[in-house]
């Protein structure tokens, strides 16, 4: 069976970005096949590991988003994981939809909502297969886009943008952009690659380089608004951030 793989270590590692890949059998017929990359193995521990490893900064980057969430608005969490941020939004009275490719993650999200006697719409799906007639006031993609390789990001951000109402928001908590200062950049890169290698070694997510998501905003009709920075004890090297963008109304520049 032949697998379409681009050249280079990164390319080979990252081409399985969608958990489903195109494979050719020996007769040359194409099939879609499931890959080994998925968060199922880590689902029960993901949240705790992320929290402990980052000394609470990952949770902090997601909590920064709560000021944009209010009662009654429709919020979609893509790649929701175990849904700690979605639970907070539901607590504020938002109409929450949680979507993840991992059925284990969705079950944990459901349990976390149940514990708080909250409800949300739960969808187990690959993001690319998630098409909704609903348009959301806010789409949240936390520590999610870094599971995809550069060549997929334009398509992915356009797909996500299509789920947002005009003038609605996208929020992305993720690794902070690497600094121009060489020392700070070296520390940020070390942090980024430790996490990257850990997930890769567990066959949870492919290896990937640092990606600047805002570079794809314009093509996806999203206007960059701001980036909130998270620093340990409000000082030192920024490792994590929250990016906020607004979906352009069609035709507006
Ligand atoms: C690093 S976790 C982040 C979870 C959560 N957003 C958080 O911040 O705690 C990434 C999540 O994206 C999900 N995911 C990865 N690829 C996906 C895809 N193609 N479609 C939907 N979900 C996906 C994984 O199952 C995993 O739960």
Image (spheres, helix red, strand yellow):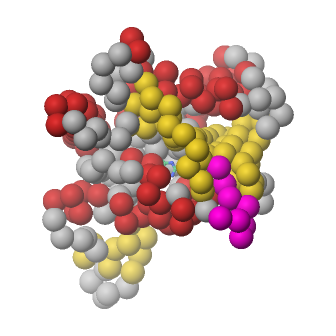
Residue 181 screen position, x and y as percent: 22, 36
- Magenta span includes 38: no
Which quadrant: the C terminus?
A: bottom right
Up/down of 129 relative to 37, above or below: below
Residue 188 screen position, x and y as percent: 25, 33
Q: Residue at x 35, y 27 (%)?
A: 238
Up/down of 245 relative to 173, above or below: below
The answer to whether 246 appears left or right of 212 in the picture is right
Q: Residue at x 61, y 62 (%)?
A: 221
Q: Quadrant of residue 47?
A: top left
Residue 157 screen position, x and y as percent: 53, 58
- Find the residue positioned furthest to the bottom: 27
Q: Which residues are magenta?
A: 246-253
Please name whichever residue, 36 or 63, is drawn nearer the observer in this view of the structure: 63
- Magenta span includes 248: yes
Residue 72 makes an appearance in the image = yes
Count of picture labels: 0
Q: Residue at x 29, y 40 (%)?
A: 178
Residue 52 makes an appearance in the image = no
Which quadrant: the N terminus?
A: bottom left
- Find the residue positioned furthest to the top: 233
Q: Residue at x 52, y 48 (%)?
A: 101
Magenta part, dominant SS: loop
The answer to whether 213 appears left or right of 195 in the picture is right
């Amino acid at each position: 069976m032949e697998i379409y793989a681009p050249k280079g270590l990164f390319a080979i590692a990252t081409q399985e970005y969608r958990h489903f890949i195109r494979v050719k059998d020996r007769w040359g017929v194409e099939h879609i096949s499931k890959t080994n990359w998925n968060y199922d193995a880590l689902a029960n521990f993901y949240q705790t590991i992320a929290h402990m490893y980052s000394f609470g900064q990952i949770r902090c980057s997601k909590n920064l988003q709560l000021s944009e969430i209010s009662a009654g608005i429709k919020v979609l969490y893509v790649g929701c994981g175990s849904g700690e941020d979605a639970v907070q939004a539901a607590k504020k009275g938002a109409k929450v939809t949680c979507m993840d490719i991992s059925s284990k993650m969705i079950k944990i999200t459901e349990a976390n909502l149940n514990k708080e006697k909250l409800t949300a719409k739960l969808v187990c799906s690959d993001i690319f297969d998630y098409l909704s007639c609903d348009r959301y006031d806010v789409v949240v993609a936390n520590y999610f886009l870094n599971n995809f390789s550069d060549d997929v990001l334009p398509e992915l951000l356009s797909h996500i943008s299509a789920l947002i109402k005009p003038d609605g928001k996208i929020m992305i908590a993720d690794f902070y952009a690497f600094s121009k200062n060489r020392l700070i950049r070296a520390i940020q890169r070390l942090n980024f690659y430790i996490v990257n290698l850990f997930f890769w070694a567990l066959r949870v997510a492919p290896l990937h380089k640092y990606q600047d998501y805002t570079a794809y905003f314009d093509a996806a009709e999203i206007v960059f608004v701001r980036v909130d920075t998270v620093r340990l004890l409000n000082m030192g090297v920024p490792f994590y951030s929250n990016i906020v963008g607004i979906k352009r109304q069609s035709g507006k520049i």
